[in-house]
Image (spheres, helix red, strand yellow):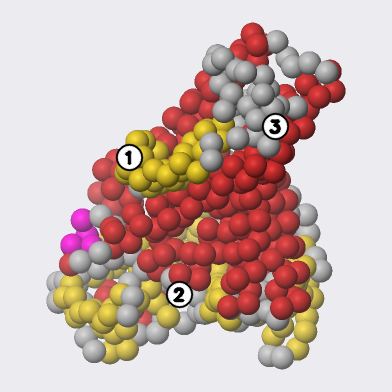
């Protein structure tokens, strides 16, 4: 069932956005008298066909996306020189026809935003959480440094209204590291503070906050460990352990740690269905510093192998040597160093139960709904902000400020995201994602890259200014180079997408 939802979500999202794009080309051509030979819903041979006027409308066996083929659009075919032929038409008419494809993606996105603004939808809360691990140690949250606390509700950043956590992420991500004026509420009182985001690995700026919530969920599973082997999935909500309700990660972790080798009944909520799994935590040895966990025996092996770990200035070359040294210095103050990281405190060794699960807190939700006037205004301004953010993101990718592998997504990853959103967040979130993907398609198609709509608009504009088209040889060379670049980029994106799939990551880990 889950696989079918993922496939259907990908087909509907990408297929509908591409279909709307091609419909824009068709109607754009009709506006200026350029005739389409074929308008197809899907690719391949049509099994349902209908001739209306000069155009064949068809549905194929693969109803994914579509295409619009105009008379006279192929430079190598013979043309009668009629105005209804694409390449025989005046440049401005071709520009309109080409531009209407991306423009329809924008209109489609605006319509979807408007529908959801009126119908209402939920977003992750604008209340923040600052976990304990962001308050001490190697990484200190910039928001915490500035004086913010768990449960604070961010209402504006640099004067821009914040309604949900994704608004916070967008404002921080594209802050360029500049100080942000953050307005927030605590216990009913309004406050204001300046927060300077920090640049994380991968080129993303962050202020060290998570969405606030009280429901526990499985955020990740270690392949082959007890939780995964029992059938528990990511995003399962945790209800109880041995019929005892748990509401915090500390409660969950403490219970599991104390039950090494003993079966534990874990009740979870998956979708709307309650399920129970019996999991037996295995024994695992952990190294602690002042009672706080540093690493387990598995990670210790990796750290010791490369000779980067030392205790009180003495390099440790094996996990066994480290454990002996830790046992000899148990409850004594020592200094541990690992590359550029150093900690000092009382070292300890503990044996705990371990099931291979990472916990996250499920964010609270906030309801968003607008009246007619505000709904229209928001449906226009939100896509505009989204376009600006995307253009800035593209610039950061080209400049190297953002990691390409982490931030560039292709059809496989988009399909995965579509499935995740449809399965875990529901139809309203899926429609909003479709609106954003449609607008992204508009942006990408209008870029001046050979072989996409943006390059054609430039060519036809040059032709209109010069009074004659560029030579066929120049056009072919540019288009060939563009196609080669797109093929290389496409191969990179697909390989990158595949490398992020859980099954591939498990294989190589």
Point out the frontmost of discs 2 and 3: 3
Write the start and end of the magenta stretch as one range.
224-229
Looking at the image, which residue is at 38% across and 73% down? 217
Q: How crowded is mark 1: few (under 14 residues within 10 Å), some or many (20 or more)?
A: few
Q: Is residue 197 left or right of residue 60?
A: right
Looking at the image, is 47 positioned above or below residue 149?
A: above
| Helix, strand or loop status at disc 3 | helix
Q: Is residue 28 left or right of residue 356?
A: right
Say if residue 274 shows up in the picture: yes
| Residue 233 position within the rendered picture, expressed as x and y whole percent measured from the top left | 28, 66
Residue named by callout 1:
305
Question: How far apart in space, not on screen, are marks 1 and 2 (Cα)?
Answer: 37 Å
Looking at the image, is 375 positioned above or below residue 186?
A: above
Residue named by callout 3:
94
Q: Is residue 378 left or right of residue 445?
A: right
Say if residue 322 shows up in the picture: no
| Residue 134 position within the rendered picture, expressed as x and y whole percent measured from the top left | 56, 66
Instruction: Choose the circle earlier in sequence order: 2 or 3.
Output: 3
| Residue 260 position within the rendered picture, expressed as x and y whole percent measured from the top left | 19, 72
Q: Is residue 11 left or right of residue 171?
A: left
Residue 421 image label: none
Point out the frontmost of discs 1 and 2: 2
Looking at the image, which residue is at 69% across and 27% down? 83
Looking at the image, which residue is at 60% across and 14% down? 476
Foreground pick, 167 / 57:
57
Residue named by callout 2:
362
Question: How far apart in space, not on screen, are marks 3 and 1 (Cα)?
Answer: 64 Å
Q: How crowded is mark 3: few (under 14 residues within 10 Å), some or many (20 or more)?
A: many
Q: Does the magenta stretch include residue 6?
A: no
């Amino acid at each position: 069932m889950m696989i079918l939802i993922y496939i259907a979500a990908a087909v509907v999202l990408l297929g509908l956005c591409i279909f709307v794009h091609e419909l824009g080309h068709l109607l754009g051509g009709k506006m200026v008298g350029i005739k389409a030979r074929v308008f197809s819903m899907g690719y391949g041979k049509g099994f349902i066909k209908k001739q209306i006027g000069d155009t064949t409308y068809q549905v194929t066996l693969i109803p994914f996306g579509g295409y619009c083929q105009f008379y006279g659009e192929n430079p190598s075919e013979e043309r009668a020189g009629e105005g209804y032929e694409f390449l025989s038409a005046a440049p401005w008419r071709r520009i309109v026809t080409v531009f209407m494809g991306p423009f329809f993606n924008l209109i489609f996105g605006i319509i979807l935003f408007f529908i959801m603004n009126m119908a209402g939808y939920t977003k992750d809360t604008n209340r923040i959480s600052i976990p304990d691990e962001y308050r001490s140690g190697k990484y200190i949250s910039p928001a915490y440094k500035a004086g913010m606390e768990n449960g604070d509700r961010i209402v504006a950043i640099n004067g821009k209204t914040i309604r949900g956590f994704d608004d916070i992420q967008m404002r921080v991500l594209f802050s360029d590291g500049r100080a942000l004026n953050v307005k927030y509420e605590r216990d009913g009182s309004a406050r204001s503070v300046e927060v300077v985001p920090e640049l994380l690995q991968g080129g993303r700026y962050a202020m060290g906050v998570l969405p606030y919530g009280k429901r526990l969920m499985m955020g990740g599973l270690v392949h082959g460990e007890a939780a995964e082997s029992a059938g528990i999935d990511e995003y399962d909500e945790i209800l109880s352990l041995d019929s005892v309700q748990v509401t915090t990660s500390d409660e969950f972790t403490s219970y599991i740690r104390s039950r090494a080798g003993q079966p534990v009944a874990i009740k979870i909520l998956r979708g709307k269905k309650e399920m129970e799994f019996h999991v037996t935590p295995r024994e695992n040895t952990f190294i602690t510093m002042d009672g706080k966990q540093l690493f387990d025996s598995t990670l210790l092996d990796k750290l010791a192998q490369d000779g980067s770990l030392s205790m009180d200035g003495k390099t440790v070359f094996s996990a066994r040597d480290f454990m002996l040294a830790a046992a000899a210095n148990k409850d004594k103050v020592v200094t541990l160093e690992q590359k550029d990281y150093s900690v000092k405190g009382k070292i300890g060794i503990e044996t705990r139960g371990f099931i291979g699960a990472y916990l996250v807190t499920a964010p609270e939700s906030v309801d968003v709904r607008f009246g007619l006037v505000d709904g229209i205004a928001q449906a226009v301004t939100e896509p505009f902000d989204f376009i600006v953010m995307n253009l800035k993101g593209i610039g950061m990718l080209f400049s190297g400020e953002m990691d390409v592998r982490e931030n560039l997504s292709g059809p496989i990853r988009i399909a995965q995201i579509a499935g995740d959103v449809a399965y875990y967040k529901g139809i309203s979130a899926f429609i909003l994602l479709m609106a954003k993907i449609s607008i992204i398609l508009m942006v990408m198609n209008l870029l001046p890259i050979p072989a996409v709509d943006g390059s054609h608009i430039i060519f036809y504009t040059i032709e209109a200014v010069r009074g004659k088209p560029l030579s066929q040889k120049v056009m072919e060379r540019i288009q060939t180079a563009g196609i080669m670049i797109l093929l290389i980029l496409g191969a990179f994106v697909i390989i990158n997408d595949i490398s992020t799939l859980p099954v591939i990551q498990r294989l190589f880990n």
